[in-house]
Image (cartoon, coloured by chain):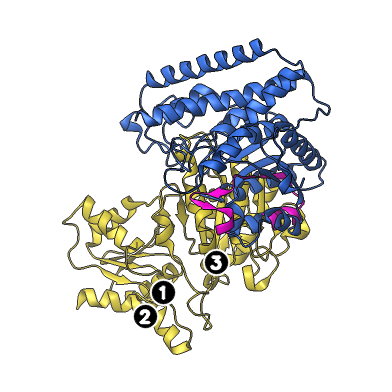
Amino acid sequence: MTVKSYAEAINEAHQQLLTEDDRVFVIGQGVNSPWCVGTSTLGLIAKFGSERVIDTPISEAVVTGAAVGAAMAGMRPIVFHPRMDFMYLAMDQIINHCAHWYYMFGGKVNVPVTIRGIINRGNEQAAQHSQSPFAMYAHIPGLKVVCPASPYEAKGLLIAAVRDDNPVLYCDDRWLYETKEEVPNEIYEVPLGKGKICREGSDITVVAVSYLAQEAIKAADLLSNEGISIEVIDPRTLKPLDIDIIMKSLEKTGRLVIANPDWPCCSFSEHVVSMILKTNFNILKSPVQYVNFPDSAIPASTPLEKAYFPDYTNIIDAVKKIFS
Amino acid sequence: MNKSSLTLPLEFELNDINNNGLNWMLLTMIRIREFEEQIATLVQQGDIITPCHLYIGQEAVATGVCYALKKDDYLFGTHRSHGHYIAKGGDLKAAMAEIFGRRTGCSKGYGGSMHLVSPEVGILGTSSIVGGSVGIAVGAALAESIRGSERVSVVFHGDGVPEEGIWHEAANFSALKCLPIIFVCENNLYCTHMPLNKRRVKDNIHDIAKEHGLETTVVDGNNVLDVYYAARDAVSRARKGQGPSFIECRTYRWRGHVGSNYDVDLGLRSQDELNTWMKRCPIKNFSNFLVNDGVMSSVELKEVWQEVSTEISEAVSCAKSSPFPDISDLTKYVFKEGGRS
């Protein structure tokens, strides 16, 4: 175990995957560019060569298609998009081809590709450089979606994603790149479809996704000083969803806050609630509180931006609303 | 070739190809024609539900290209890919069963006419999104380029595809990375209902391909030998690591965009135009050449048609008597489960 940042953990996962398996290669726009990928792929070209770590023109559709096609041909590509905003240009390749292929051909050809959608926001980047539309992808049959919230998850989920026989969308968050914790040096997997209890508690369950899992932990620590016991659950994989871990927690708490950095309409948050009610309609003692982005595009100006992106204070407010 | 030099009758020139090759080409084109003709009848009768985009008139393109390929070379196709599948060596019965929506179909009834697959002969699947398979074909070529093999990737696409953005990305990227891919543009002069001159200011798809850095040729797509020679050169370059090629095959689909009609009734094109191209039939002209050249007799030619007709009829009976997919398997293939490869 060594203390590593989230970005270092991603970088190490890439290195170990490229070393472990000849079929793995990395392709995307700006492998060495600090404004594309931070330090998450720094040094990979020098170590593994430009044949296996491929910097590309800004051609999202064909670059994604190339990774998808290579996966059909037996490779294990990681294709990255410097921002999830830019992935929209590759939607046809992701949905019509990557996600539908295995089903459309009766299981004859699988697509073991990892699509890395990097989230980058803040500093007045505005509506087209700040998005994290997880729900849009979780909606699509055939695509798994993972959102690592810590260095440990970042490394283990990437390794599990690449080793999976299916397409996996891996959404890493630039706001977490400097977050540090102890991470195993060896190669390991965080299993897809398994959530994690980040903090145990008994009064309220907070299901928190991506950077809001870190914010929820902060909120839990602060609220414990006020005698409120929060259980923080990071689902880690939005699809397939570990509903059991959430149900077990609710059996204890009966109260729910969902913190999810995405828009509210037809969202992952709403899906979680619908799954809960379908499983056990009487489990909730009070109305659910949501912490998410407003149902608007993302603004530039700092004060607007500050109001737009939720943090631990919004989670604390949501918890207090339940008790008010 | 010059676009305006599409001749009648077609002129065939023998250049390093033996009688077995000539016979295979004729047989393959007849198999495609007969397969499609029987499907047209079945569509008219209401026996087939899945939308069928027939390849009649374009048989020389798939045949000429696939004769230049090895079994494990990749082929990516379109919504109009029955011909590509047959020419690459896909199983006829499995394709027919797929078109009938049966469990024994090549895609087990999940794909239909537009989604044929046969990994054992390099067909990793056909896409019904115009331009959709261009990107994944680049990916298969990239995989082989990284592996350092001599396997090539061929993508068939229509003349509408260069009007899609991904085609330009694919052309540039594969030229940039010197990938072993061959773009075969089947310019049948129509994209769904729209003729070329209503979609483009200039009839210059090949010029644009060339500007992107693809080695480019234009051939008479109704002349199976000319198509083959162009494909042979392109494949040879790709195997040697000399990069991607683009072959524009000038041809014509006899039937309408979808189904068994001719689209003349819809006012989309004229009977005169259709008649002119039917005179340029890729099969009739080629078989006349083979008979005149003494490669086969007219009796043997008749026998080929009869054998193929029987083969296709058997595929139809086989499909009709096959079971439908099991309803309990409705969501079976969303994710691949179990052990990892």
Query: Is residue B238 shown left or right of residue A106?
Result: right
Pinpoint residue A148: horizontal percent, then vertical percent: 49, 61
Q: Nearer the viewer, mark 3 or mark 1?
A: 3
Query: Is B195 covered by the magenta stretch?
Result: yes
| Label 3 packing within 10 angstroms: few (<14), some (14-19), many (20+) | some
Q: Quadrant of residue B240?
A: top right
Spot occupied by residue A147 in the image (x, y as percentages of width and height)? 47, 60
Q: Is residue A316 left or right of residue B269?
A: left
**Mark 3 to mark 1: distance in Å?**
31 Å
Mark 3: amino acid? Phe
Q: Is residue B13 above or below residue A231?
A: above
Q: Are marks 2 and 1 on the same chain?
A: yes
Q: Colour of chain A?
A: yellow
Give the residues in magenta: B171-199
Camera-near label (2 vs 1) is 2
| Dot label at residue A86 | 3
Which residue is denoted by mark 2 in the rendering? A313
Visible residue check, residue B317: yes
Label 1: element kind: helix
User: Which residue does the numbered mark 1 point to in the structure image?
Assistant: A218
Q: Which chain is blue?
A: B
Q: Position of residue B320 (x, y in %)?
A: 38, 21
- Amino acid type, residue under disc 1 in the picture: Lys
What residue is drawn where x is 81% and y is 44%? B241
Question: Which SS class for mark 2?
Answer: helix
Q: Examine the image and state in which quarter residue A289 appears.
A: bottom left
Badge 2 local density, few (<14 within 10 Å), some, or many (20+)? some
